[in-house]
Image (cartoon, rainbow, N blue to C red):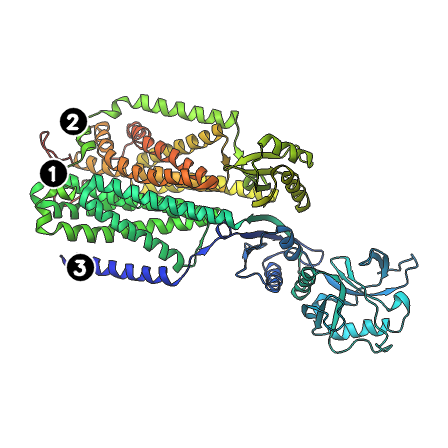
Amino acid sequence: MTRANVVRALLALAVLATSLYFALSKPARLGLDLRGGTQMVLETRDSPTVKAGRESTDRAKEVLQRRVDALGVAESSLTRSGDRRIIVELPDVQDPTRAAQVVGRTAQLTAHPVRANDGKPKQGEQVLPDESGQPVLIGPAALTGDGIGSADAMYDQQNMAGWLVTIKFRGGGGAAWEKVTAKAACGAGDDRRVAIVLDGKVISSPAVTQDVACGIGITGGSTQITGDFTPTEAKELAALVQGGSLPVPVEIIEQRVVGPTLGDAAIKASAQAAVIGVLLTGLFIIAVYRLVGLLATVALACYALISYAALVAIGATLTLPGLAGFVLAIGMAIDANVLAFERAREEYAAAPRRGVRGALATGFDKAWSAIADSNITTLLAAGLLFFLASGPVRGFGVTLTIGVLGSLISAMLLSRVLTESVVARRAVSRRPGLTGLGSIGRVRRLLEKRRPDVMRRRRLWLGISALAVVLAVTGIFVRGLNFGVEFTGGRLVEYSTSRPVNIDSARAAVSDAGFPRAVVQTSGTDDISVRTEKLTNEQEKSIRDALAEKGGQITKQRDELIGPSLGDELRTKALIALAVALLAQLAYLAIRFRWTFGASAVTAMFHDVIVVTGVFAWLGKPIDGVFLAALLTIIGYSVNDSVVVFDRVRELWGARPKAPFAEVANLGAVQTVPRTVNTGMGALFILAALALLGGDSLTDFAIALLIGIVVGTYSSVFVATPLAVVFERRAKAPPPRPKTGPRPAARQQGDSGAVV
């Protein structure tokens, strides 16, 4: 074993040991869409006295954190997003009505003196219904929530009078309470009462007891609020009182509720898809590359360990799209191995005397350029997802980034150490056929035998692509895009029923409940989804009751609420993400290659985006955040394919600068077909498993990527390469310089190798 391989082996062992430690010592942090619970996005608004901004939002977050802590929600999370938004995550909380009432209320708690209601309120006084519904005349506030220190809900064990809330004051709160109760103790009838008002509503107006002396009041720095409270109401009131009043009002602009059973099903489906996909991918790679394919499959299993360990080590939250990205990255991880093995096959075919070991080392070295360029383009798409997307889709960007970096470690470190160590053995090196590198493969042999001239019919291929774009655009304008609530605003609720419900009966039930314009569709096998623009929690309950009459016991599986302003913002962000993705890829390719190659690759990528979007328009599939994640992944994959082709074209053109570019481009495109087919098959196994097992959201995601991979594979050869031929006719830049260093001799027509 060479010194370089010894260093790689030690580094690989260190990476695996570290990964194993994190994988066994730290559990994965599941997002609410997998674990179940409620997520709300609150936006602070200006009040008459305070302007909403970073400082006031931070103070509001502190108040909300105290309320949530008082509710006893385990592992809750509150984070500020931007200057005016607060993201609240409440695991295992399935009732959005209760969560919104407790978390989203402004909770302006005040105490007021009460006087006899003569129907003539003076300045600063007002008439409000008391807790029994009778009008009561209250004076100006004598105590605000700022003077309250803590509040606890407890059962009145002494008097057996039910639940009450004990309040302890702080600062000047105790003195203010003593003053208002001292004045009330001197009165009679209503004049002895003190009204406790929360958000403009009288929640309790007890009379000061006779044992409180006139002019002295209630001392001791604490008091009790009594009323006809249930245990839940008392605890929620205590949480609101202890949390204090929000410095600025807040509005719920986004709300997601996911049932735990839906998350469990998604995890099981993704795990099954991962196992099946990896097994099929491994069997395929072993069948194609034999011994080195088997070793690459072992490295692929290690890649899954490394990626998972990285995920838990950085504390990333695993969401449903993120889980899909993790599974998808397993399929994409084989790409670097395929590139290296195909180059090794070419090197051995061109110079068999160097042996399989030398060919493999050279294959890894020469494949690095294409591997680096293709992975950087994928990282650009993943980075855009993280910075420009929102919600669970950002998790997809994180896991895709981890997957790309993990695939580089798996292929360029683990796989290289394993394959070079085994191939270096004399018993193996003498049998090149066993290694899988002794021949160029059936696909390459067939292509070299027929020598297809793809570029000669470039006008035909470009015409077919133009027709596909026209059909896609027609679908977008004729059928329209079925935007999800993320981009339109509104509310989407998904229910499961104990009895099958005909979709027409479900639509009739929702219409009878007062929502004739609601979009009612089947979701999955027996689930029913209802989408409408405006839907309060009370109205949602009426729809649920109406469906329960048809389907028996009903369970809410998912509940998403997006405000109209947030929907517009997310739609704008999606367009910005796509535009930035196109420009970023174009800039990188123009710098890394030539402007002609960059323009061709980006045009082919734009072709892929339009075609996939058009297919979804014709099928009526939803255009939502998950689709955006798939679309940006397709952008990375499409450029990935084009980069591999152009990297080979650049190398061939540098070696043959006087040859016609169309001939060189055709040769480069044909030579990369085996890599494209083998890599695509690896990803297709994973995606097919996701499409069949992954549930609604993952199914649409997998379908989009399946279409994108097929179209992207086509466009890299039949769109990007012909366009490069057309653009090069107008380019004035000279051909690229050949790479320095010794090169193996080119194979003659009768040899079994590849032209390099």
Q: Kindly state the secondary structure of the residue where label 2 is placed.
A: helix
Q: Do the residues labelled 3 and 1 touch (CB within 8 Å)?
A: no
Residue 676 appears at what percent x and percent y?
27, 36
Label 2 environment density (alpha carbons within 10 Å; few <14, some 14–19, many ≥20): few
Label 3 environment density (alpha carbons within 10 Å; few <14, some 14–19, many ≥20): few
In the image, residue 536 above or below residue 46: above
Q: Nearer the viewer, mark 3 or mark 1?
A: 3
**In the depicted view, which residue is nearer to us: 10 or 587?**
10
In the image, residue 479 above or below residue 405: above
Q: Kindly state the secondary structure of the residue where label 3 is placed.
A: helix
- Label 3 and label 1: CA atoms lie apart by 28 Å
Q: Which mark is residue 350?
A: 1
Say which residue label 3 marks.
Answer: 6
**Residue at (60% x, 30% y) in the render:** 504
Q: Earlier in the sequence, mark 1 or mark 2?
A: 1
Q: Looking at the picture, which amino acid does disc 3 mark?
A: Val
- Label 2 and label 3: CA atoms lie apart by 41 Å
Q: Looking at the picture, which amino acid does disc 2 mark?
A: Lys
Label 1 environment density (alpha carbons within 10 Å; few <14, some 14–19, many ≥20): many
Q: Are marks 1 and 2 in contact (CB under 8 Å)?
A: no
Say which residue label 2 marks.
Answer: 449
